[in-house]
Image (tube, grey):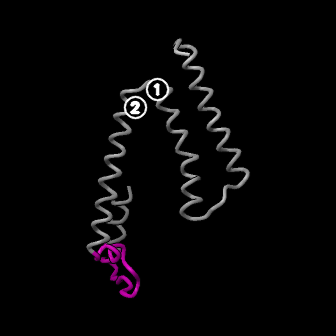
Amino acid sequence: IFTPIALAVTALRQKYGVAPDDDAPGIWDGLQDPTKLLLLLLLSVLGFAGLGLQTYGYQRERAARASAMNFLEIPFSYVLQYLLFGDVLSPIQGLGTLLVISGGLLNLFADVQTSGEG
């Protein structure tokens, strides 16, 4: 949806003679550096590989166990947030994290008991 809008805005600017501000940084100005392009390509490849491996893992594991792994993303993201940016977890964020993780664990334990593995 954004590409047609961007094309329409560009076409209207050209039609009515509105020139872009040459002093303003453009969207592609940061990608002139080959190092940044290489990092962008590397991040794209790693993100695609991670998504592919996650999909493969979902196909090989039962749904309740696989969904429980998604709940681990929340505490790990808060740990990385603290380590990388120094942001401290607020009490409401901690409460929300506990509620989401406990709901996921309850779902996992209920699935294990009904399947007879526990």
Q: Residue at x 67, y 50 (%)?
A: 93
Point 58% across, 46% down: residue = 75
Q: Residue at x 55, y 39 (%)?
A: 71
Q: CA distance from mark 1 to mark 2?
A: 7 Å
Please identify the residue farthest to the right as the structure is shown: 91
Q: Where is 60 relative to 78, above or below?
A: above
Whether residues under marks 1 and 2 lie with C-beta atoms below 8 angstroms apart, the answer is: yes
Mark 2 — residue? 58
Is label 2 in a helix, a strand or a loop? helix
Image quadrant holding the C terminus, namely top right
Q: Is residue 86 left or right of residue 5?
A: right
Q: Quadrant of residue 30?
A: bottom left
Q: Which range of residues does the magenta coloring cover?
A: 13-33
> Principal SS element in the magenta part?
loop
- Residue 22 lies in the magenta-colored region: yes
Identify the image quadrant of the N terminus: bottom left
Q: Amino acid at mark 1?
A: Ala
